[in-house]
Amino acid sequence: MKIEVLEQGERIVIRRLTLAVGEAMPWHADACRRYSVVLSGDRLAIEYRSSGERIEFPVHRGLSGWDEPEPRVHRAVNPGDLPYEEIVTFLREHGDIEPQPSPT
C-alpha cells in the first residue's frame, strides 16, 4: 500500500492511494466528508472489523463520488486482478482532524 499526500491545508487533504492486488489498508474510520476518483482497478471490497461484513463491488477508471464520514472501523481491500489507485479529497472542518484515524 502506498499513500501519497498531494496537498494539505487547514480544510483540505488530497491523497493518492495505491493498493496492489490482494493488499489491504490498515483498519480506520473516516472522520471527514470526501470525494474519490478511481484512477485504476477493477474491484474493491470494504471490510468492517466489528461485524466481519464485507461488501465487494466493481470499480473502473473515472468512477467518482462523494462519501460521508464512516465512524465504523473498516478497511479497503483490493480483491481484483489489477492494482487499485484513487485520488481522495478530504474536507476537514478544521486542521486538527485526521481524515482517517486509526482505532484506539
Image: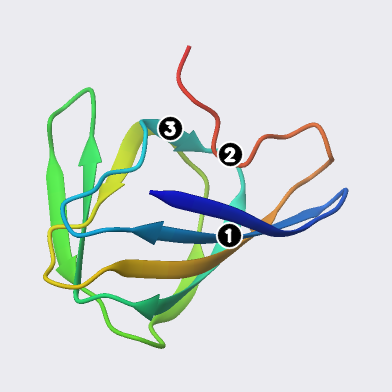
Q: Measure the alpha-carbon separation of dots 3 and 1.
A: 15 Å
Residue type for callout 2 = Ala
Q: Would you identify the image quadrant in which residue 19 lies?
A: bottom left
Q: Position of residue 6 (x, y in %)?
A: 70, 62
Closer to us: 68 or 14? 14
Instruction: State if disc 3 and disc 2 touch (CB < 8 Å).
Output: no
Closer to us: 97 or 69? 97
Which dot, 2 or 3, sits closer to the camera? Answer: 3
In this picture, residue 6 sits left or right of residue 40: right
At horizontal 73% and vertical 34% (from top left) the residue drawn is 97
CA neighbours of label 1 inside 10 A, class few (<14), some (14 to 19), many (20+): many
Q: Can you identify the residue that label 3 sits on?
A: 28
At horizontal 45% and vertical 69% (from top left) the residue drawn is 86
Residue type for callout 3 = His
Q: Can you identify the residue that label 2 sits on?
A: 31
Q: Would you identify the image quadrant in which residue 48 lies?
A: top left
Which of the two labelled residues, at mark 3 and mark 1, occupies the earlier sequence position? 3
Closer to us: 80 or 57? 80
Q: Position of residue 65 (x, y in %)?
A: 47, 75
Residue type for callout 1 = Arg
Instruction: State if disc 1 and disc 3 touch (CB < 8 Å).
Output: no
